[in-house]
Amino acid sequence: MTAFTFRNARIVDPASGHDALGSLRVIDGQIDDIGDGLAHDDDEIIDANGAILCPALIDLRAAIEPAFTPSGETLDTLAPAAAAGGIGTIIVSPTSQMPIDTPEIVGGLKSAALPNPVRILIAGGATRTLDGSTLSEIGLMAECGAVFVSQGDRPVTDTAALRNLFNYAAGFELWIACPAREPFLSAGSVATESEAAARYGLVVEPASAERLAIDRLATLAELTGARLMIDRVSTAEGLDALSRARQRGIEICATAAIANLTLNAVDADGLDPAYRLTPPLRSEDDRRALVAAIANGQIDAIVSDHRPICLDEKAQPFADASPGSIGVETLLAALLWLVHEGELDLVDALRPLTSGPADLLSLVQGRLEAGAPADLVLIDGDAPWIFDAGKGRSARRNAAWQNRRFQGQVLMTMVGGGMVYNHRG
């Protein structure tokens, strides 16, 4: 029997709202008890010295690159980067370059993920063509371990095909993640609609495109009974559409990317391709609306939207650069910025990275209670540091948070009671 006890920890469990100093005991990879005076004589003692102890994070959206990509991001490079960011469970989602659209790919990735230090789950690609006219074998992908299906970064343009997709996914009670992008208003866009984007002559995506997309998707979900996940809502108009859909009783949830919660369109005004993202960085009013939606529970999960890209594709003029940023190592630190700025309290900030996504996927991790897996992260909430992607664990360096000053650093990450990252040495 292996047993150890954290002492002098600020124990934060978003699922129950618990936030207090205390101890947490682990036996054989599971949480045994939370309280005071828990340690037995033969327990290993870990003195937290007042650091935050909470469930390891769950990230619903990260990408890898195809195996043939030179020096690309693989499961073996993604996993240690995630562990360093306090992530215990990460979902690899499809992209245009890595579609994950067959049962064989899902099963192969699931098997390849097993030796890695964090829990890696797989989201299957919902369609096999850009317009959605050919559906993937969703049932077989589910049998092979897909935890939900996703359109990835390519919204389906054909509404009849989208209805067929929703009908198919509904038969397996799988969430279907759809980007909140109206296919035609968003086509070719590289920035949000703004005065600066107009001056630069950029192709823009209006906020209303997100509202129209969510209204369209929600209508089809209502028609088919599908479980709809709005993938990375980014505007106040999108949140309004989401609220209307919930009032109609539609089974709908929503994620938000950490970039849209902590950065805004002003960051992109210098046309640095590091800030070329999808969805694009929005107005400050939109950003604040998203933060408020985290506090009131309207957004179910925050995602890193980790998107590794090679230098040749990123180091281009803003409009030509591939969209995306790595983000697993900075996900928690960026979130803690909102706490230090007084925009969120700690429990509300952590909920959509722990119990929120766990509840969506019926995962047993993501909470601190007796019998739950000891997936834990210890955090110095005040430690200052600067992110340097060149020293990071990801295989890529395309970081919107390069050289950002953060306050709050992961000290230790555990998965199933095993140490997968230890900054304390």
Image (tube, rainbow, N blue to C red):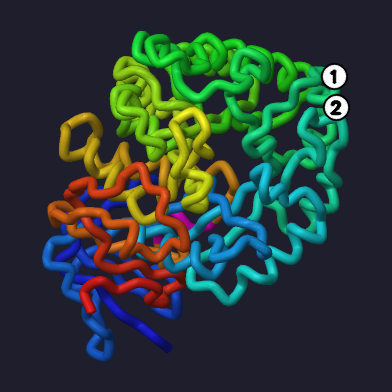
Name the secondary structure under disc 1: helix
Q: Main secondary structure of the magenta part?
A: loop
Q: Which residue is denoted by mark 1 in the rendering? A: 160
- In the picture, the disc for residue 112 is none
Q: Is residue 263 above or below residue 337?
A: above
Query: Looking at the image, which residue is at 63% across and 17% down?
Result: 182
Q: Which residue is denoted by mark 2 in the rendering? A: 164
Q: Type of residue at label 1?
A: Ala
Query: Looking at the image, which residue is at 66% across and 58% down?
Result: 66
CA gap, disc 1 to disc 2?
A: 6 Å
Q: Quadrant of residue 342?
A: top left
Q: Type of residue at label 2?
A: Asn
What is the x, y in percent for residue 194? 39, 11
Query: Looking at the image, which residue is at 72% across and 51% down?
Result: 100
Indicate yes or no whether the magenta region holds residue 367.
Answer: yes
What is the x, y in percent for residue 119? 53, 64
Left or right: residue 356 compared with residue 342: right
Q: Quadrant of residue 375?
A: bottom left
171 vs 388, nearest the viewer: 388
Indicate yes or no whether the magenta region holds residue 275.
Answer: no
Q: Is residue 59 above or below residue 391?
A: above
Could you tell me if residue 235 is visible in this image? yes
Count all numbered tags in the image, as a single digit.
2
Chain part drawn in magenta:
364-369
What is the x, y in percent for residue 392? 35, 63
| Label 1: how many Cα within 10 Å (few below 14, some 14–19, many 20+) | few
| Label 2: how many Cα within 10 Å (few below 14, some 14–19, many 20+) | some
Name the secondary structure under disc 2: helix
Left or right: residue 354 compared with residue 405: right
Could you tell me if residue 60 is visible in this image? no
What is the x, y in percent for residue 371? 46, 66
Callout 1–callout 2 Cβ contact below 8 Å? yes
